[in-house]
Amino acid sequence: MTDNQFNQLFDLVTKSVNGIQRVEKDIIVIKTDVAELKTDVAELKTDVAELKTDVSELKEGQKRIEKEVRLNTVAINEIVSEQFRTKIRVDELERASV
């Protein structure tokens, strides 16, 4: 092997080693990014679970409010009916007393 060939081969080996080192550094960065993403995914899953709980609580609250509205509507209807009956009775008594 001539000196020129040796130098060319050595240059190629050096470039290969440098390329491998860059790839290894990139792999470390990628692994770090993957670890961060896994952490972020875990946090998002926790957030989703909390949101699901909140939605369930809101639905339960909405059902309670709807039930209370129905009960209040029934009570108001009864009061209005009683007022109407009372007015009719008062009108009858007023007519009877005239």
Image (cartoon, rainbow, N blue to C red):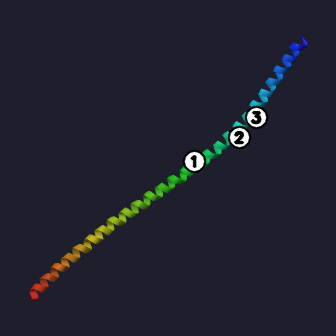
Residues at marks 1 and 2, CA–CA distance in whole angstroms = 20 Å
Q: Are marks 3 and 2 in contact (CB under 8 Å)?
A: no
Residue position marked by numbered label 3 in the rendering: 25
Q: Amino acid at mark 2?
A: Thr
Residue plotted at (84% across, 17% down): 9
Q: Say which label, 3 or 1, has the lower sequence index.
A: 3
Q: Amino acid at mark 3?
A: Lys
Q: Give the image quarter of residue 84.
A: bottom left
Local crowd size for mark 2, using a 10 Å CA cut-off: few (<14), some (14–19), many (≥20): few
Residue position marked by numbered label 1 in the rendering: 45
Up the image or down, 26 lies above or below 59; here it is above
Q: Nearer the viewer, mark 3 or mark 2?
A: 3
Q: Position of residue 21 (x, y in %)?
A: 79, 30
The secondary element bearing badge 1 is classed as helix
* Of residues 19 and 90, the one drawn nearer to the viewer in this rendering: 19
The disc placed on residue 35 is none
Local crowd size for mark 1, using a 10 Å CA cut-off: few (<14), some (14–19), many (≥20): few
Which residue is situated farthest in the top direction here? Answer: 1
| Left or right, 22 with reference to 44 | right
Residue plotted at (19% across, 79% down): 86
Residue plotted at (32% across, 65% down): 70
Q: Say which label, 1 or 2, has the lower sequence index.
A: 2
* Of residues 85 and 2, the one drawn nearer to the viewer in this rendering: 2
Residues at marks 3 and 1, CA–CA distance in whole angstroms = 30 Å
The disc placed on residue 32 is 2
Q: Position of residue 62 (x, y in %)?
A: 41, 60
Q: Position of residue 74 (x, y in %)?
A: 28, 68
Q: Amino acid at mark 1?
A: Lys
Q: Say which label, 3 or 2, has the lower sequence index.
A: 3
Residue plotted at (39% across, 64% down): 65
Q: Give the image quarter of residue 41.
A: top right
| Left or right, 87 with reference to 12 | left
